[in-house]
Image (tube, helix red, strand yellow):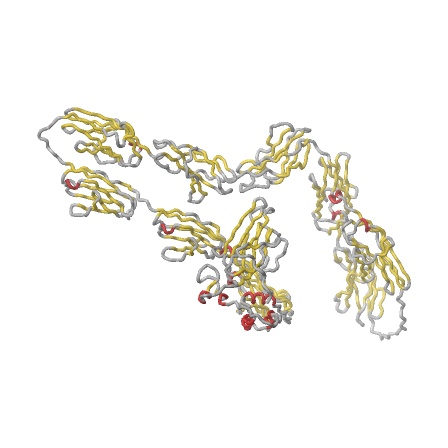
């Protein structure tokens, strides 16, 4: 067994061979897919032998300097298995780009190579209309010192996808045998010769005998080495090919050619006969039989055979399913616990299967995950999300993948209605009621930290979102703090129950009332309280006085009653409590408290200041964009929440997505911000949060969508195309860098040389790459510049290096006659004549047409003339249109003329006076005169037919007879014949024929052949040239030939000479003699090959020679431009 190739170093990259080295092998059955193959690879992967269990990396480099878009790379195994869909722990792909060299580097890494990785691979790169591919093979060798400790582990499957994936790999059971040292020298055994001659059932036995462990690689190589001798077929001239490949949905045609055109064929598919239908179409053209399969599906991937009698022709059809791509990617999802999650993806094929994975683990259909499919759309559904579902979800198809993040937050419970404090008398009913946002939430009631137990007097209810605690017949021991705690949430709702006792003082005392304000608690300064919006304010004021004073709270002129409500006053002995539930901005202001009793009065003022988070910023807008950045500006919030704004936080997202990305985590103080690291050509939206000492505001309204786009680079190659009095025509090429914004057009500007003010020539951008600037001052030197415009603005200008003088340039008139009009132009009667003759000259020349020296009649011929060409048009040509046409192009006293000859031809008339001049034996001699009307061209021949007067059926005798006479032979004795003759030219035969005036009768008289004595004619003659050499003028570098004809017997010897010197075995000259026609071919003559050439013929009877002059000229640039 031959030695395998040396593997590369473990884990190292496999260097690619040079790009100009062709691939050594072609993957069997693989057909090229692109119409244009170009060398795009700078480096290609090469065939390697890998060590089992080690890593191997393949590197391919692609030059993108000539590409307009990023190339697409595919790694394939075998015929069409796309490895991109197999990406994971076993197969890893990497891509990088070098901006300096414009080279893309693609890497394929196979981690821990297994035996199943052996085989043929192909990498294919495509970019618009360009394509390139290369093939390479991987063979796998077992590690040298690996021993199988557990035999059960040998029965494993290849790959890392799981215990049920891949193919069974039994190669681990094969033990490596150590070769015993033999004293005698080993004899060389050709294992391949033994295998080629052995039966397939003995392959395994032979492999074991000679120590071959890679049985799969052996069979693959043996298949390539075997050459099957084609068996000659009696029924088939051309059989079916070994295999055919077709894309899914396309049609394919199978052809065979039979030796018997009338033979019947049968077409079979997997042994079953195919019947003709709209899908299977049978065709028969002569000996060719065709089977057309329309709209191929995966079911058509089968073995086909064509049966003729006892013989068969086999083939296989492989239906290639195009890779399924993802047309709509997954979006990131943010939900709270318990909500439903739906990941949606859209693919390119309705019947495609997709694979869902989470954090590298494939998802299966169970109670938690549901899969849904509708046409090209696929969904992954999670009915009730939990925090365990947080992670990255992937979806894979055969041609792409997509991923998205799922974020699940704990559900926050919102208090819709809090518990109010109560002050009650004995025997009254106390009702504590609160409302939360989730009706499923349960909870417990506590009094002073001890859980409340229901009884006949105490009842607890839960209806929807409302929770109630009802206490009947309130007693003094019921007073205290009551709290409701929802289950599962770190939240509590509290209120106080005050028991009011009525006491009667029989000895009343009088003491003036007094308000005692405690300024050490919530007061930030004297008599001022600051409350955060939404919080509860409870302000207790101690009051003294006898009898107990009456307390009155006012805000402005409005008195605050003691009724229950959000803002209320609770009064107890020696205490007045001012309560605001859920403070709002409207609660801010100056509050007055007045206490009175018969002994006097006291007053105090309390300032309540409500602080809140600021309002959202306003008017968020994008002011400028760059290639990967954008400048955003906004207005500060109208209300700062009562606390100065410290700064702002910014977020952005892609349009159509629901995932916002925070741009800064430190507070940003300015109202303008430049966002960076954005993707050019993608629409974004921005929003801003304001931050003060209380917290973060609500987000602002999203800005209008904007797209980071950079202006293009400057246009290139700005040149002047034409200058006239007052105008200048410019042309240029598009910018080298355009970007995602494209080009909306170009702005052209000009200014006088030495000035600084540029004037815009066009109001709206010009889409074409050329423009004529008009209204320029004659004689002035002007500078021009061109700027590209797109949505991002103007590019840098391309400025003309030198000033242009605005003055008409006189150019001599010149007619550029097309090559086909330099000789006689021939057309048939009734055909269309359309001749376009370009010319040049400035200013616009005067064009004149003449026919045969007289002005052209425009009623017979249409003439259309533009600035650069003139057109002669005849809708239906007639003979009177034949003649010499003269075209004259004149500018002032300068003129150029050309003459072209047009010949309109038609079929000729019949010959004249066909006569039978002589009859002898079975022969007749005919003569006639040429036709009067030759169709305006030369008569090329005649066609002669004969007819027996008995049957009067015409039969062909001679065709293309060039002379006006002929001899008709093989006439039948006893018949009388008449003859007719047709004339021919380049248009064909005449419509009518001329019939002979007399007939030829073949009499039945006895015929006696008088044998003439045979006299052998002396055919010997000296050489004689019947066609001489002709002087020629040829162009250097283009092969030329000179010819002549000679006769003589015996066959003369031919000698070619140049300038009287014999031309020997010079490879530059090729001498040919074909039946006396002598040709000397000169390959790519140069100036040194010019001169006098002589051809001399010599035999025993004499000699003859002819000569000619050959001129070799070098074509100049002016003549090349003229052509």
- Please provide percent x and percent y for residue 153: 45, 65
> Total marks drawn?
0
Q: Is residue 308 visible?
A: no
Q: Nearer the viewer, residue 664 or 720?
A: 664
- Please provide percent x and percent y for residue 669: 42, 33
Q: Quadrant of residue 416?
A: top left
Q: Nearer the viewer, residue 714 or 859?
A: 714
Residue at the left extreme of this rendering: 506
- In the picture provided, is 666 more to the left or to the right than 736? left
In which quadrant is the C terminus drawn?
Answer: top right
Q: Quadrant of residue 603?
A: top left
In which quadrant is the N terminus drawn?
Answer: bottom right
- Residue ID at (45%, 54%): 375
Q: Nearer the viewer, residue 626 or 291?
A: 626
- Please provide percent x and percent y for residue 855: 76, 40
Q: Nearer the viewer, residue 21 or 801?
A: 21
Residue at the top extreme of this rendering: 600
- Residue ID at (61%, 32%): 749
Residue at the front extreme of this rendering: 183
Above or below, 614 against 348 in this view is above
Above or below, 933 against 493 in this view is below
Q: Is residue 133 visible?
A: yes
- Please provide percent x and percent y for residue 524: 29, 30
Above or below, 61 against 232 in this view is above
């Amino acid at each position: 067994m031959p030695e395998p190739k040396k593997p590369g170093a473990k884990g190292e990259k496999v260097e690619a061979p040079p790009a100009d080295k062709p691939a050594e092998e072609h993957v069997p059955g693989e057909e090229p897919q692109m119409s244009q193959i170009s060398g795009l690879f700078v480096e290609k992967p090469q065939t390697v032998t890998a060590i089992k269990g080690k890593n191997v990396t393949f590197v391919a480099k692609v030059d993108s300097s000539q590409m307009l878009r990023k190339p697409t790379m595919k790694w394939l195994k075998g015929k069409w298995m796309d490895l991109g869909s197999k990406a994971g722990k076993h197969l890893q792909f990497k891509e990088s780009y070098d901006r300096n060299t414009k080279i893309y580097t693609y890497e394929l890494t196979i981690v821990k190579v297994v035996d199943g990785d052996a085989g043929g691979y192909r990498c294919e790169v495509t970019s618009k209309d360009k394509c390139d591919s290369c093939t390479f093979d991987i063979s796998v060798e077992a590690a040298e010192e690996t021993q199988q400790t557990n035999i059960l582990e040998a029965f494993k499957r290849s790959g890392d996808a799981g215990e049920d994936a891949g193919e069974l790999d039994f190669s681990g059971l094969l033990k490596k045998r150590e070769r015993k040292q033999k004293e005698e020298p080993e004899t060389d055994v050709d294992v391949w010769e033994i295998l080629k001659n052995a039966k397939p059932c003995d392959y395994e036995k032979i492999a074991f005998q000679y120590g071959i462990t890679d049985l799969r690689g052996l069979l693959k190589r043996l298949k390539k080495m075997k050459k099957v001798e084609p068996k000659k077929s009696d029924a088939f001239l051309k059989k079916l090919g070994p295999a055919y490949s077709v894309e899914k949905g396309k049609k394919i045609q199978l052809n065979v050619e039979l030796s018997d055109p009338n033979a019947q064929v049968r077409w079979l598919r997997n042994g079953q006969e195919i019947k003709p239908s709209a899908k299977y179409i049978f065709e028969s053209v002569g000996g060719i039989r065709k089977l057309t399969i329309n709209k191929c599906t995966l079911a058509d991937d089968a073995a086909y055979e064509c049966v003729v009698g006892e013989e068969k022709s086999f083939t296989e059809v492989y239906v290639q399913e195009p890779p399924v791509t993802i047309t709509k990617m997954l979006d990131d999802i943010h939900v709270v616990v318990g909500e439903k999650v739906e990941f949606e993806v859209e693919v390119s094929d309705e019947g495609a299967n997709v694979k869902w994975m989470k954090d590298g683990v494939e998802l299966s259909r169970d109670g938690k995950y549901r899969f849904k499919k509708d046409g090209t759309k696929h969904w992954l559904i999670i009915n009730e999300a939990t925090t365990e579902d947080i992670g990255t979800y992937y979806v894979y198809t055969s041609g792409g993948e997509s991923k998205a993040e799922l974020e699940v937050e704990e559900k926050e419970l919102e208090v819709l209605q809090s518990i109010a404090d109560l002050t009650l008398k004995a025997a009254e009913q106390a009702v504590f009621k609160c409302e939360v946002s989730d009706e499923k939430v349960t909870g417990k009631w506590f009094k002073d930290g001890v859980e409340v137990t229901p009884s006949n007097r105490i009842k607890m209810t839960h209806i929807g979102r409302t929770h109630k605690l009802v206490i009947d017949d309130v007693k003094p021991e019921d007073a205290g703090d009551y709290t409701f705690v929802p289950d599962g949430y770190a939240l509590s709702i509290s209120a106080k129950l005050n028991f009011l006792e009525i006491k009667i003082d029989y000895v009343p005392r009088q003491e003036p009332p007094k308000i005692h304000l405690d300024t050490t608690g919530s007061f930030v300064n004297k008599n001022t309280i600051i409350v955060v919006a939404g919080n509860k304010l409870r302000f207790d004021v101690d009051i003294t006085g006898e009898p107990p004073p009456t307390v009155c709270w006012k805000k402005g002129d409005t008195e605050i009653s003691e009724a229950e409500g959000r803002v209320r006053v609770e009064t107890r002995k020696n205490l007045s409590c001012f309560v605001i539930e859920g403070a709002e901005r409207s609660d801010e202001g100056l509050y007055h408290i007045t206490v009175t009793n018969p002994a006097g009065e006291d007053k105090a003022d309390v300032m309540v200041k409500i602080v809140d988070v600021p309002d959202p910023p306003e008017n968020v807008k994008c002011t400028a964009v760059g290639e990967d950045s954008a400048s955003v500006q906004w207005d500060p919030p109208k209300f700062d929440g009562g606390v100065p704004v410290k700064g702002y936080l910014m977020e952005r997202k892609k349009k159509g997505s629901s995932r916002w990305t925070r741009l800064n985590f430190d507070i940003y103080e300015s109202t303008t911000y430049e966002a960076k690291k954005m993707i050019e050509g993608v629409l974004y939206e921005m929003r801003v949060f304001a931050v003060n000492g209380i917290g973060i505001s609500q987000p602002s309204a999203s800005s209008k969508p904007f797209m980071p786009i950079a202006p293009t680079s400057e246009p290139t190659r700005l040149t002047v195309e034409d200058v006239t009095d007052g105008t200048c025509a410019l042309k240029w090429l598009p910018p080298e860098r355009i970007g995602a914004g494209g080009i909306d057009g170009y702005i052209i500007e000009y200014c006088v040389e030495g000035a600084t003010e540029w004037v815009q020539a066009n109001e709206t951008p010009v889409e074409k790459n050329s423009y004529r600037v008009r209204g320029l001052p004659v004689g002035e030197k002007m500078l021009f510049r061109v700027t590209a415009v797109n949505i991002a603005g103007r590019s840098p200008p391309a400025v003309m290096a030198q000033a242009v003088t605005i003055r008409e340039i006189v150019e001599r008139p010149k007619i550029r006659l097309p090559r086909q009009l330099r000789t006689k132009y021939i057309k048939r009667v009734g055909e269309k004549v359309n001749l376009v003759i370009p010319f040049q000259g400035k200013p616009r020349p005067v064009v004149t047409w003449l026919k045969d020296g007289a002005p052209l009649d425009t009623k017979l011929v249409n003439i259309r003339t533009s600035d650069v060409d003139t057109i002669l048009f005849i809708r239906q040509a007639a003979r009177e249109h034949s003649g010499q046409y003269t075209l004259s192009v004149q500018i002032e006293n300068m003129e150029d003329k050309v003459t072209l000859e047009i010949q309109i031809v038609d079929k000729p008339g019949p010959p004249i006076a066909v006569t039978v001049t002589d009859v002898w034996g079975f022969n007749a001699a005919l003569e006639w005169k040429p036709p009067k009307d030759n169709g305006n061209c030369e008569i090329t021949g005649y066609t002669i037919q004969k007819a027996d007067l008995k049957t009067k059926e015409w039969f062909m005798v001679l065709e293309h007879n060039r002379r006006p006479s002929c001899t008709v032979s093989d006439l039948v004795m006893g018949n009388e014949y008449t003859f007719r003759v047709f004339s021919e030219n380049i248009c064909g035969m005449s419509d009518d024929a001329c019939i002979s005036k007399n007939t030829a009768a073949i009499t039945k008289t006895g015929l006696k052949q008088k044998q003439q004595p045979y006299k052998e004619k002396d055919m010997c003659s000296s050489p004689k040239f019947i066609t001489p050499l002709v002087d020629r003028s040829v162009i250097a570098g283009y092969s030329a030939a000179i010819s002549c004809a000679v006769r003589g017997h015996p066959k003369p010897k031919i000698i070619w000479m140049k300038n009287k010197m014999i031309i020997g075995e010079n490879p530059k000259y090729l001498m040919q003699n074909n039946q006396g026609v002598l040709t000397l071919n000169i390959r790519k003559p140069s100036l040194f090959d010019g001169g006098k050439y002589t051809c001399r013929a010599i035999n025993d009877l004499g000699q003859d020679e002819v000569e000619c002059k050959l001129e070799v000229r070098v074509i100049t640039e002016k003549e090349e431009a003229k052509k």
